[in-house]
Amino acid sequence: MKVLMLNPPGPYCRAGSRWPHRRPIQSVGIDYHPFPFGLAYAASRARADGHAVRVLDCIALGMSADALIAQVREFNPDVVFMETSAPSFRGDVEIMRAIGQPCVAGGAHATATTREHIQAGFAGVIRGEYDQVITDALRLLPRPWLATKTAPATEHAPLVVRLDDIPWPAWDLLPMEKYNDPICRGRSVTVLSSRGCPHRCSFCTLAPYHGGHDYRLRDPKAVCDEIAELIRRYHPDEIYFDDDSISLNRKHVLALCEELRRRRFGVPFSCMGHATVAHDVLEAMAAAGCRAYKFGVESADPDVLRQIPKALELDDVVRTVHDCRRLGIRTHATFVFGLPGETRESAMKTIEFALRLRTHTLQFAIATPYPGTALYEHARGKGWLIKEDWNDFDPAAESVLSYPDYSAADIAEMHALAWRRWQWHILTRQPGTLFHHFHNAYERGGVAGLGRLGWYGAGRLVSFLKARR
Protein backbone atom coordinates (compact mmCIF):
# COMPACT_ATOMS: atom_id res chain seq x y z
CA MET A 1 0.00 0.00 0.00
CA LYS A 2 0.98 3.62 -0.54
CA VAL A 3 0.51 5.39 2.79
CA LEU A 4 0.57 9.10 3.59
CA MET A 5 1.15 10.06 7.24
CA LEU A 6 -0.13 13.56 7.85
CA ASN A 7 0.04 16.38 10.37
CA PRO A 8 -2.59 18.56 8.62
CA PRO A 9 -2.08 22.24 7.81
CA GLY A 10 -3.54 25.11 9.78
CA PRO A 11 -2.38 27.42 12.54
CA TYR A 12 -2.23 24.69 15.21
CA CYS A 13 0.51 23.01 17.18
CA ARG A 14 -0.92 19.48 17.11
CA ALA A 15 1.08 16.29 16.48
CA GLY A 16 3.80 15.93 19.10
CA SER A 17 2.23 18.45 21.49
CA ARG A 18 0.62 17.59 24.82
CA TRP A 19 -1.50 20.74 24.66
CA PRO A 20 -2.79 21.48 21.15
CA HIS A 21 -3.07 25.22 20.62
CA ARG A 22 -3.31 27.86 17.93
CA ARG A 23 0.02 29.18 16.70
CA PRO A 24 0.52 32.82 15.70
CA ILE A 25 -0.12 33.40 11.99
CA GLN A 26 3.28 35.07 11.83
CA SER A 27 6.12 33.54 13.81
CA VAL A 28 7.44 35.72 16.63
CA GLY A 29 10.95 34.32 16.36
CA ILE A 30 10.56 31.71 19.13
CA ASP A 31 9.34 29.12 16.64
CA TYR A 32 8.19 25.91 18.35
CA HIS A 33 7.83 22.65 16.43
CA PRO A 34 7.61 19.54 18.62
CA PHE A 35 8.86 16.32 17.08
CA PRO A 36 5.79 14.20 16.09
CA PHE A 37 6.84 10.91 17.69
CA GLY A 38 3.55 9.13 16.96
CA LEU A 39 3.73 9.86 13.24
CA ALA A 40 7.46 9.09 13.09
CA TYR A 41 7.13 5.74 14.85
CA ALA A 42 4.03 4.84 12.82
CA ALA A 43 5.89 5.63 9.59
CA SER A 44 8.82 3.41 10.53
CA ARG A 45 6.42 0.61 11.52
CA ALA A 46 4.44 0.83 8.27
CA ARG A 47 7.63 0.92 6.24
CA ALA A 48 9.03 -2.11 8.07
CA ASP A 49 5.78 -3.89 7.23
CA GLY A 50 6.37 -3.35 3.53
CA HIS A 51 4.36 -0.21 2.74
CA ALA A 52 5.51 2.75 0.67
CA VAL A 53 5.33 5.65 3.15
CA ARG A 54 5.46 9.41 2.87
CA VAL A 55 5.17 11.80 5.84
CA LEU A 56 3.99 15.41 5.52
CA ASP A 57 4.23 17.53 8.65
CA CYS A 58 2.41 20.52 7.22
CA ILE A 59 2.87 22.58 10.38
CA ALA A 60 6.65 22.21 10.46
CA LEU A 61 6.88 22.68 6.69
CA GLY A 62 4.52 25.68 6.63
CA MET A 63 2.53 23.87 3.95
CA SER A 64 -0.86 25.27 2.91
CA ALA A 65 -3.97 23.19 2.26
CA ASP A 66 -3.65 23.77 -1.50
CA ALA A 67 -0.03 22.62 -1.48
CA LEU A 68 -0.99 19.55 0.51
CA ILE A 69 -3.72 18.56 -1.94
CA ALA A 70 -1.22 18.92 -4.80
CA GLN A 71 1.17 16.60 -2.93
CA VAL A 72 -1.64 14.10 -2.34
CA ARG A 73 -2.51 14.04 -6.03
CA GLU A 74 1.14 13.54 -6.97
CA PHE A 75 1.69 10.69 -4.47
CA ASN A 76 -1.79 9.18 -4.93
CA PRO A 77 -1.87 7.22 -1.65
CA ASP A 78 -4.16 4.27 -1.05
CA VAL A 79 -4.88 5.50 2.46
CA VAL A 80 -4.06 8.55 4.60
CA PHE A 81 -3.45 8.62 8.34
CA MET A 82 -3.67 11.89 10.27
CA GLU A 83 -3.59 13.14 13.83
CA THR A 84 -6.41 15.45 14.86
CA SER A 85 -6.94 17.71 17.87
CA ALA A 86 -9.82 19.50 19.57
CA PRO A 87 -9.13 23.09 18.42
CA SER A 88 -8.20 22.02 14.88
CA PHE A 89 -10.95 19.40 14.39
CA ARG A 90 -13.13 21.50 12.09
CA GLY A 91 -10.19 22.19 9.78
CA ASP A 92 -8.99 18.58 10.03
CA VAL A 93 -12.36 17.38 8.77
CA GLU A 94 -12.21 19.81 5.86
CA ILE A 95 -8.77 18.48 4.91
CA MET A 96 -9.98 14.87 5.22
CA ARG A 97 -12.87 15.57 2.84
CA ALA A 98 -10.67 17.48 0.38
CA ILE A 99 -8.15 14.62 0.17
CA GLY A 100 -10.71 12.32 -1.42
CA GLN A 101 -9.00 9.13 -0.21
CA PRO A 102 -9.84 6.89 2.78
CA CYS A 103 -8.53 8.59 5.93
CA VAL A 104 -7.79 7.01 9.31
CA ALA A 105 -7.42 9.21 12.40
CA GLY A 106 -5.50 8.76 15.63
CA GLY A 107 -4.16 10.62 18.64
CA ALA A 108 -5.56 11.82 21.96
CA HIS A 109 -8.54 13.68 20.51
CA ALA A 110 -9.47 10.88 18.12
CA THR A 111 -9.28 8.41 21.01
CA ALA A 112 -11.72 10.49 23.07
CA THR A 113 -14.16 11.24 20.23
CA THR A 114 -14.22 8.21 17.93
CA ARG A 115 -17.95 8.54 17.22
CA GLU A 116 -17.67 12.17 16.12
CA HIS A 117 -14.78 11.27 13.80
CA ILE A 118 -16.72 8.46 12.13
CA GLN A 119 -19.78 10.70 11.76
CA ALA A 120 -17.57 13.33 10.10
CA GLY A 121 -16.46 10.82 7.46
CA PHE A 122 -13.22 9.19 8.65
CA ALA A 123 -12.96 5.59 7.43
CA GLY A 124 -11.42 4.46 10.70
CA VAL A 125 -10.32 5.78 14.09
CA ILE A 126 -7.64 4.18 16.27
CA ARG A 127 -8.39 4.32 19.96
CA GLY A 128 -5.16 4.57 21.94
CA GLU A 129 -1.47 4.33 21.13
CA TYR A 130 -1.47 3.91 17.37
CA ASP A 131 2.10 3.69 16.13
CA GLN A 132 2.64 -0.09 16.33
CA VAL A 133 -0.87 -1.17 15.27
CA ILE A 134 -0.93 1.15 12.29
CA THR A 135 -0.73 -1.54 9.58
CA ASP A 136 -3.90 -3.33 10.72
CA ALA A 137 -5.66 0.02 11.02
CA LEU A 138 -4.71 1.16 7.52
CA ARG A 139 -6.18 -2.04 6.14
CA LEU A 140 -9.33 -1.42 8.22
CA LEU A 141 -9.10 -4.94 9.64
CA PRO A 142 -11.69 -5.67 12.35
CA ARG A 143 -10.06 -4.91 15.67
CA PRO A 144 -11.65 -3.97 19.03
CA TRP A 145 -9.58 -0.77 19.17
CA LEU A 146 -10.50 0.40 15.64
CA ALA A 147 -13.75 2.28 15.10
CA THR A 148 -15.32 2.09 11.63
CA LYS A 149 -18.71 2.86 10.11
CA THR A 150 -19.89 -0.65 10.96
CA ALA A 151 -18.21 -1.22 14.34
CA PRO A 152 -17.39 0.93 17.38
CA ALA A 153 -14.06 0.77 19.21
CA THR A 154 -14.60 -1.04 22.50
CA GLU A 155 -10.99 -1.18 23.73
CA HIS A 156 -7.70 0.68 23.59
CA ALA A 157 -4.94 -0.54 21.32
CA PRO A 158 -2.44 -2.74 23.15
CA LEU A 159 0.42 -0.76 24.63
CA VAL A 160 3.95 -1.32 23.41
CA VAL A 161 5.73 -2.97 26.33
CA ARG A 162 9.20 -3.62 24.91
CA LEU A 163 10.02 -0.16 23.59
CA ASP A 164 13.49 -1.13 22.42
CA ASP A 165 12.11 -3.78 20.04
CA ILE A 166 10.34 -1.30 17.76
CA PRO A 167 12.03 0.49 14.82
CA TRP A 168 13.51 3.92 15.46
CA PRO A 169 11.45 6.87 14.23
CA ALA A 170 11.54 7.51 10.47
CA TRP A 171 13.76 10.59 10.75
CA ASP A 172 14.61 10.54 7.03
CA LEU A 173 10.95 11.17 6.13
CA LEU A 174 10.69 14.30 8.28
CA PRO A 175 12.17 17.84 8.14
CA MET A 176 14.50 17.29 11.10
CA GLU A 177 15.95 20.80 10.92
CA LYS A 178 12.53 22.22 11.84
CA TYR A 179 12.01 20.51 15.19
CA ASN A 180 13.00 22.18 18.43
CA ASP A 181 11.99 23.05 21.95
CA PRO A 182 12.33 26.70 23.04
CA ILE A 183 14.42 25.70 26.07
CA CYS A 184 17.07 24.12 23.85
CA ARG A 185 20.02 26.10 22.59
CA GLY A 186 20.63 26.11 18.87
CA ARG A 187 19.79 23.06 16.77
CA SER A 188 18.39 20.07 18.66
CA VAL A 189 17.20 16.52 18.10
CA THR A 190 14.58 14.78 20.22
CA VAL A 191 14.54 11.32 21.79
CA LEU A 192 12.41 9.34 24.26
CA SER A 193 13.75 7.20 27.10
CA SER A 194 10.27 6.29 28.38
CA ARG A 195 6.57 6.50 27.57
CA GLY A 196 3.62 7.41 29.73
CA CYS A 197 3.15 8.79 33.24
CA PRO A 198 1.69 7.21 36.41
CA HIS A 199 0.35 10.49 37.79
CA ARG A 200 -3.33 11.46 37.64
CA CYS A 201 -3.51 15.16 36.77
CA SER A 202 -7.13 15.76 35.75
CA PHE A 203 -6.30 18.10 32.85
CA CYS A 204 -3.79 15.76 31.19
CA THR A 205 -4.62 13.78 28.04
CA LEU A 206 -1.99 11.08 28.56
CA ALA A 207 -3.99 8.53 30.58
CA PRO A 208 -7.14 8.82 28.40
CA TYR A 209 -4.97 8.36 25.32
CA HIS A 210 -2.93 5.40 26.51
CA GLY A 211 -5.84 3.81 28.33
CA GLY A 212 -4.29 3.95 31.79
CA HIS A 213 -1.57 5.43 33.96
CA ASP A 214 1.17 3.41 32.31
CA TYR A 215 4.90 4.06 32.54
CA ARG A 216 7.35 2.12 30.39
CA LEU A 217 11.12 2.43 30.30
CA ARG A 218 13.78 1.91 27.66
CA ASP A 219 17.19 0.39 28.21
CA PRO A 220 19.66 3.29 28.66
CA LYS A 221 22.14 1.55 26.33
CA ALA A 222 19.51 1.40 23.56
CA VAL A 223 18.63 5.05 24.16
CA CYS A 224 22.28 6.05 23.81
CA ASP A 225 22.65 3.93 20.66
CA GLU A 226 19.84 6.00 19.17
CA ILE A 227 21.45 9.24 20.35
CA ALA A 228 24.75 8.21 18.74
CA GLU A 229 22.97 7.73 15.41
CA LEU A 230 21.14 11.06 15.73
CA ILE A 231 24.43 12.83 16.40
CA ARG A 232 26.09 11.08 13.45
CA ARG A 233 23.32 12.08 11.07
CA TYR A 234 22.32 15.56 12.24
CA HIS A 235 25.21 17.03 14.29
CA PRO A 236 22.95 18.77 16.84
CA ASP A 237 23.92 21.38 19.39
CA GLU A 238 21.69 19.70 21.98
CA ILE A 239 19.68 16.56 22.74
CA TYR A 240 16.13 17.00 24.04
CA PHE A 241 14.44 14.21 26.02
CA ASP A 242 10.71 14.62 25.44
CA ASP A 243 9.71 12.02 28.07
CA ASP A 244 6.49 12.83 29.87
CA SER A 245 8.60 12.77 33.03
CA ILE A 246 12.17 11.55 32.79
CA SER A 247 12.85 11.70 36.55
CA LEU A 248 10.04 9.47 37.85
CA ASN A 249 12.13 6.32 38.17
CA ARG A 250 15.28 6.99 40.16
CA LYS A 251 17.08 3.83 39.04
CA HIS A 252 16.32 4.54 35.40
CA VAL A 253 17.45 8.16 35.33
CA LEU A 254 20.66 7.36 37.21
CA ALA A 255 21.45 4.50 34.81
CA LEU A 256 20.74 6.75 31.83
CA CYS A 257 23.04 9.45 33.20
CA GLU A 258 25.79 6.90 33.81
CA GLU A 259 25.51 5.63 30.23
CA LEU A 260 25.57 9.20 28.87
CA ARG A 261 28.73 9.87 30.86
CA ARG A 262 30.33 6.67 29.61
CA ARG A 263 29.58 7.47 25.96
CA ARG A 264 31.07 11.00 26.17
CA PHE A 265 28.97 12.38 23.32
CA GLY A 266 30.12 15.94 23.99
CA VAL A 267 26.56 17.20 23.36
CA PRO A 268 24.49 18.63 26.26
CA PHE A 269 20.90 17.65 26.86
CA SER A 270 17.67 19.15 28.17
CA CYS A 271 14.70 17.23 29.48
CA MET A 272 11.30 17.35 31.16
CA GLY A 273 10.53 15.80 34.54
CA HIS A 274 8.86 16.21 37.90
CA ALA A 275 9.12 19.48 39.80
CA THR A 276 10.82 17.81 42.76
CA VAL A 277 14.04 15.88 42.21
CA ALA A 278 16.52 14.51 44.75
CA HIS A 279 19.76 16.46 44.93
CA ASP A 280 21.95 13.46 44.07
CA VAL A 281 19.84 12.77 40.96
CA LEU A 282 20.32 16.36 39.82
CA GLU A 283 24.05 16.00 40.47
CA ALA A 284 24.13 12.91 38.25
CA MET A 285 22.19 14.74 35.55
CA ALA A 286 24.55 17.72 35.67
CA ALA A 287 27.58 15.43 35.47
CA ALA A 288 26.03 13.71 32.43
CA GLY A 289 25.63 17.02 30.58
CA CYS A 290 22.17 18.25 31.55
CA ARG A 291 21.90 21.91 30.56
CA ALA A 292 18.20 22.61 31.20
CA TYR A 293 15.30 21.02 33.06
CA LYS A 294 11.54 21.57 32.47
CA PHE A 295 8.77 20.81 34.96
CA GLY A 296 5.15 21.64 35.73
CA VAL A 297 4.11 23.52 38.88
CA GLU A 298 0.63 24.57 37.66
CA SER A 299 -0.40 26.60 40.73
CA ALA A 300 0.96 28.14 43.92
CA ASP A 301 -2.32 27.39 45.73
CA PRO A 302 -2.08 24.08 47.69
CA ASP A 303 -5.87 23.69 47.51
CA VAL A 304 -5.80 23.87 43.71
CA LEU A 305 -2.97 21.32 43.62
CA ARG A 306 -5.02 18.96 45.81
CA GLN A 307 -8.02 19.25 43.50
CA ILE A 308 -6.11 18.53 40.27
CA PRO A 309 -4.75 16.29 42.00
CA LYS A 310 -0.99 16.91 41.91
CA ALA A 311 1.28 15.74 44.72
CA LEU A 312 3.58 18.72 45.07
CA GLU A 313 5.04 20.83 47.86
CA LEU A 314 6.01 24.34 46.84
CA ASP A 315 9.05 24.34 49.14
CA ASP A 316 10.35 21.32 47.23
CA VAL A 317 9.93 23.19 43.96
CA VAL A 318 11.99 26.07 45.34
CA ARG A 319 14.66 23.59 46.43
CA THR A 320 14.76 21.97 42.98
CA VAL A 321 15.31 25.32 41.29
CA HIS A 322 17.95 26.29 43.87
CA ASP A 323 19.79 22.98 43.38
CA CYS A 324 19.64 23.31 39.60
CA ARG A 325 21.03 26.83 39.77
CA ARG A 326 23.96 25.67 41.93
CA LEU A 327 24.68 22.84 39.50
CA GLY A 328 24.50 25.05 36.41
CA ILE A 329 21.23 23.56 35.13
CA ARG A 330 18.79 26.12 33.74
CA THR A 331 15.12 25.66 34.59
CA HIS A 332 11.76 26.12 32.89
CA ALA A 333 8.50 26.01 34.87
CA THR A 334 4.93 25.81 33.58
CA PHE A 335 1.82 27.25 35.26
CA VAL A 336 -1.88 26.92 34.45
CA PHE A 337 -4.64 29.46 35.20
CA GLY A 338 -8.29 28.52 35.63
CA LEU A 339 -7.98 25.16 37.36
CA PRO A 340 -10.77 24.15 39.79
CA GLY A 341 -10.49 25.95 43.12
CA GLU A 342 -8.55 28.93 41.79
CA THR A 343 -9.58 32.51 42.61
CA ARG A 344 -8.20 35.86 41.53
CA GLU A 345 -6.31 35.98 44.81
CA SER A 346 -4.73 32.56 44.38
CA ALA A 347 -3.94 33.32 40.73
CA MET A 348 -2.06 36.40 41.90
CA LYS A 349 -0.14 34.19 44.36
CA THR A 350 0.80 31.95 41.45
CA ILE A 351 2.12 34.93 39.49
CA GLU A 352 4.17 36.16 42.44
CA PHE A 353 5.52 32.67 43.13
CA ALA A 354 6.48 32.19 39.47
CA LEU A 355 8.46 35.45 39.47
CA ARG A 356 10.14 34.72 42.82
CA LEU A 357 11.12 31.24 41.63
CA ARG A 358 13.62 32.80 39.23
CA THR A 359 13.55 30.07 36.62
CA HIS A 360 15.43 30.87 33.44
CA THR A 361 12.25 30.62 31.38
CA LEU A 362 8.61 29.83 32.12
CA GLN A 363 5.24 29.32 30.51
CA PHE A 364 1.68 30.31 31.40
CA ALA A 365 -1.37 28.57 29.92
CA ILE A 366 -5.13 28.54 30.45
CA ALA A 367 -6.69 25.36 31.81
CA THR A 368 -8.38 23.61 28.90
CA PRO A 369 -10.61 20.57 29.51
CA TYR A 370 -9.83 18.51 26.44
CA PRO A 371 -12.41 15.79 25.67
CA GLY A 372 -11.55 12.54 27.39
CA THR A 373 -9.91 14.13 30.43
CA ALA A 374 -11.28 13.98 33.95
CA LEU A 375 -11.42 17.78 33.96
CA TYR A 376 -13.70 17.74 30.90
CA GLU A 377 -16.18 15.36 32.54
CA HIS A 378 -16.05 17.25 35.83
CA ALA A 379 -16.59 20.60 34.13
CA ARG A 380 -19.57 19.34 32.14
CA GLY A 381 -21.13 17.85 35.26
CA LYS A 382 -20.67 21.04 37.28
CA GLY A 383 -21.81 23.39 34.53
CA TRP A 384 -18.42 25.10 34.32
CA LEU A 385 -18.03 24.50 30.58
CA ILE A 386 -19.36 27.59 28.83
CA LYS A 387 -18.37 26.67 25.26
CA GLU A 388 -18.98 23.38 23.46
CA ASP A 389 -17.26 24.25 20.17
CA TRP A 390 -13.87 22.53 20.22
CA ASN A 391 -12.51 25.28 18.01
CA ASP A 392 -12.51 27.47 21.13
CA PHE A 393 -10.41 25.01 23.16
CA ASP A 394 -7.14 26.92 23.02
CA PRO A 395 -4.96 27.13 26.19
CA ALA A 396 -2.95 29.98 24.68
CA ALA A 397 -5.94 32.24 24.05
CA GLU A 398 -9.14 32.05 26.10
CA SER A 399 -10.91 30.10 28.81
CA VAL A 400 -13.85 27.81 28.11
CA LEU A 401 -14.28 27.35 31.86
CA SER A 402 -16.16 29.73 34.12
CA TYR A 403 -16.80 29.31 37.84
CA PRO A 404 -19.50 30.96 39.99
CA ASP A 405 -17.04 33.41 41.58
CA TYR A 406 -14.28 33.30 38.98
CA SER A 407 -15.36 33.95 35.40
CA ALA A 408 -13.73 33.10 32.09
CA ALA A 409 -12.94 36.80 31.72
CA ASP A 410 -11.20 36.76 35.12
CA ILE A 411 -9.11 33.76 34.09
CA ALA A 412 -8.09 35.36 30.79
CA GLU A 413 -7.21 38.59 32.61
CA MET A 414 -4.95 36.81 35.10
CA HIS A 415 -3.29 34.87 32.29
CA ALA A 416 -2.58 38.07 30.36
CA LEU A 417 -1.32 39.79 33.51
CA ALA A 418 1.05 36.91 34.21
CA TRP A 419 2.62 37.19 30.76
CA ARG A 420 2.97 40.97 31.05
CA ARG A 421 4.60 40.69 34.48
CA TRP A 422 6.99 38.00 33.26
CA GLN A 423 7.99 39.92 30.14
CA TRP A 424 8.69 43.03 32.20
CA HIS A 425 10.61 40.88 34.67
CA ILE A 426 12.98 39.45 32.09
CA LEU A 427 13.43 42.85 30.47
CA THR A 428 14.43 44.51 33.74
CA ARG A 429 15.88 41.69 35.86
CA GLN A 430 16.78 38.68 33.68
CA PRO A 431 18.51 39.87 30.51
CA GLY A 432 20.04 36.41 30.17
CA THR A 433 16.62 35.07 29.24
CA LEU A 434 16.31 37.69 26.51
CA PHE A 435 19.72 36.70 25.18
CA HIS A 436 18.65 33.02 25.12
CA HIS A 437 15.54 33.79 23.05
CA PHE A 438 17.33 36.12 20.64
CA HIS A 439 20.16 33.61 20.22
CA ASN A 440 17.68 30.88 19.30
CA ALA A 441 15.73 33.22 17.02
CA TYR A 442 18.94 33.88 15.11
CA GLU A 443 20.02 30.21 15.05
CA ARG A 444 16.65 29.12 13.66
CA GLY A 445 15.61 32.10 11.57
CA GLY A 446 18.69 34.21 10.91
CA VAL A 447 18.36 37.99 10.76
CA ALA A 448 14.67 37.62 9.87
CA GLY A 449 14.12 35.61 13.05
CA LEU A 450 15.82 38.31 15.09
CA GLY A 451 13.67 40.96 13.46
CA ARG A 452 10.43 39.08 14.12
CA LEU A 453 11.29 38.53 17.75
CA GLY A 454 12.38 42.13 18.20
CA TRP A 455 9.15 43.42 16.65
CA TYR A 456 7.10 41.10 18.85
CA GLY A 457 9.03 42.16 21.97
CA ALA A 458 8.56 45.84 21.19
CA GLY A 459 4.83 45.30 20.81
CA ARG A 460 4.63 43.46 24.13
CA LEU A 461 6.56 46.27 25.84
CA VAL A 462 4.17 48.90 24.49
CA SER A 463 1.23 46.77 25.63
CA PHE A 464 2.70 46.49 29.11
CA LEU A 465 3.34 50.22 29.42
CA LYS A 466 -0.21 51.00 28.31
CA ALA A 467 -1.63 48.55 30.85
CA ARG A 468 0.31 50.26 33.66
CA ARG A 469 -1.24 53.67 33.00
Image (cartoon, rainbow, N blue to C red):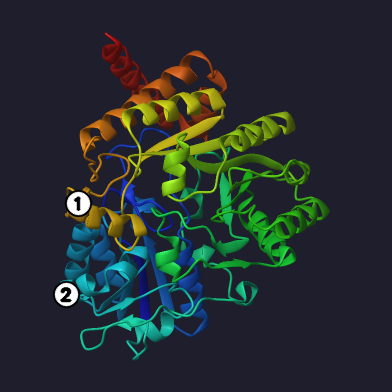
Q: Which residue is mark 2?
A: 119
Q: How many marks?
A: 2
Q: Secondary structure at mark 1?
A: loop
Q: Which residue is mark 1?
A: 383
Residue 352: x and y in percent read 46, 23
Can you see residue 370?
A: no
**Viewer-proximal residue among 271 and 234:** 271
Query: Can I make out residue 137 in this image?
Result: yes
Image quarter (top left, top right, bottom left or bottom right) of the N terminus: bottom left
State left or right for residue 321 relative to residue 1: right
Give 398 or 66, whichever is nearer the viewer.
398
Residue kind at label 1, given as amino acid type: Gly
Amino acid carrying mark 2 in the image: Gln
Q: Nearer the viewer, mark 1 or mark 2?
A: 1
Residue at image coords 35%, 59%: 374
Q: In the displayed structure, would residue 152 be above or below residue 410?
A: below
Q: Position of residue 412 (x, y in %)?
A: 27, 33
Measuring 29% from the left and 18% from the top, which residue is drawn there?
463
Please report the residue visible at 48 percent of the width from the left and 85 percent of the height from the top: 50
Q: Quadrant of the C terminus?
A: top left
Mark 1 crowd level (few <14, some 14–19, many ≥20, 10 Å Cα): few
Quarter location, residue 164:
bottom right
Residue at the limit of the structure toward the bottom, as seen here: 142
Q: Are marks 1 and 2 in contact (CB under 8 Å)?
A: no
Say left or right for 80 vs 274.
left
SS at mark 2?
Answer: helix
